[in-house]
Image (tube, helix red, strand yellow):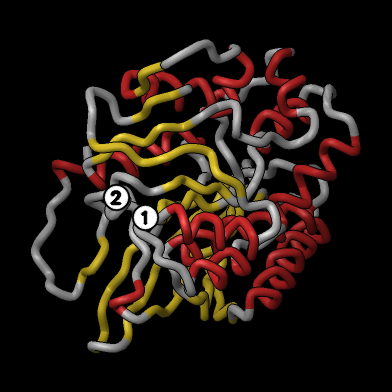
Amino acid sequence: MLARVPRWANENVLVGFDTNDDAGVYRLTPDLALVQTVDFFTPIVDDPYTFGAIAAANSLSDVYAMGGRPISALSIVAYPGKGDLDDLTEILRGGAEKMREAGCAILGGHSITDDEIKFGYAVTGTIHPSRVRANATAQAGDALVFTKRLGTGVIATALKRGLASPEHVAAAVDSMLALNRRAAEVLDGLDVHGLTDITGFGLIGHAREMAAASGVTLEIDSRLVRFLPGAVEYARQGALAGGLKNNREFSSGCVARDGAVSGEIESLLYDPQTSGGLLVSLPGADAARLETALEGAYRIGRVLPQGDSLIRLL
């Protein structure tokens, strides 16, 4: 579909949609560029305030994934005409508080009447043109480091089915509420070659985008990937979202399996994440520095020269 969308050359577009990156980057001056992104979705938790805050953290993540600093946001709201306005207020308040935590100003927004609730933000950030962190520049020989645990989609599905325990939901919510700002700050001092955040397409889907854009193969060791409490158990019980199945159908053809991977673990690698962590490609020495400086950062694999498949799964 995107191949049929008209496009034209613009020397100031540093990152467009050609490489499926996390945000667009437009150069204003030799020393300043804008980072722009938009994201919104339906509620994944019951509490409206928490939903609003998660939606904000998720929208901000794409700017951090480009190495940028978010400065302003516009809200996007779809809400039932006869819906509870107190709940809507809490959604907006949760989002506003998270934006304030990020130091990002809300300038306004747009709302429509819709029977299905949806909420999110269009976020603008700034960055020096020479400091853009793209998904298209991973290099063979790099280590792969991830900054959060996986499993928010499976846990949200288990919650909807009445399977999830409160403590498991709380751990997933804490993960989704955590901004990627600290990770971006630590990465600013390292030799980062490739960077993306893991959200709706899951770990495999976004790793596939990085591998394709960079002309490499990413080797992911499933034994090293860490999961949120309860995620493996719920995946084993079949609490798999429709988005997970779509991700698997889209990306599995690019994956070569080298060794046995259990069904539930493999499913979680396709699990759509909300406000997920950052996947970083960088030299081994810098990977060690990242693991030391950023709590929760850990290696999950390495970057190989391009082979027969985009993803090699151990």
Disc number for residue 194: 1
Query: At 82% from the left edge and 49% from the top edge, which residue is drawn?
Result: 47
Choose between 127 and 18: the one closer to the eye: 127
Query: At 74% from the left edge and 72% from the top edge, which residue is drawn?
Result: 97
Please, which residue is most extreme toward the front here? 285
Q: Amino acid at mark 2?
A: Gln
Side of 220 where 26 appears, left or right: left
Please, which residue is most extreme toward the left here? 9
Q: Is label 1 in a helix, a strand or a loop?
A: strand
Query: At 60% from the left edge and 33% from the top edge, which residue is drawn?
Result: 224
Contact? badges 2 and 1 (CB < 8 Å): yes
Q: Decide: is 105 above or below 235.
A: below
| Residue 182 in the image, given as x and y percentages of width and height | 63, 68
Choose between 165 and 281: the one closer to the eye: 281
| Residue 41 in the image, given as x and y percentages of width and height | 57, 47
Query: At 31% from the left edge and 48% from the top edge, which residue is drawn?
Result: 20
Q: Decide: is 148 above or below 24.
A: above
Q: Quadrant of the N terminus?
A: top left
Choose between 85 and 55: the one closer to the eye: 55
Does any portion of residue 60 appear in the rendered image? yes
Side of 313 where 101 appears, left or right: right
Q: Closer to the camera: disc 2 or disc 1?
A: 2
Badge 1: how crowded within 10 Å, few (<14), some, or many (20+)?
many
Alpha carbon distance from label 2 to label 1: 8 Å
Q: Which residue is mark 2?
A: 139
Does any portion of residue 275 appear in the rendered image? no
Q: Is label 2 in a helix, a strand or a loop?
A: loop
Q: Amino acid at mark 1?
A: Gly
| Residue 18 in the image, given as x and y percentages of width and height | 22, 51
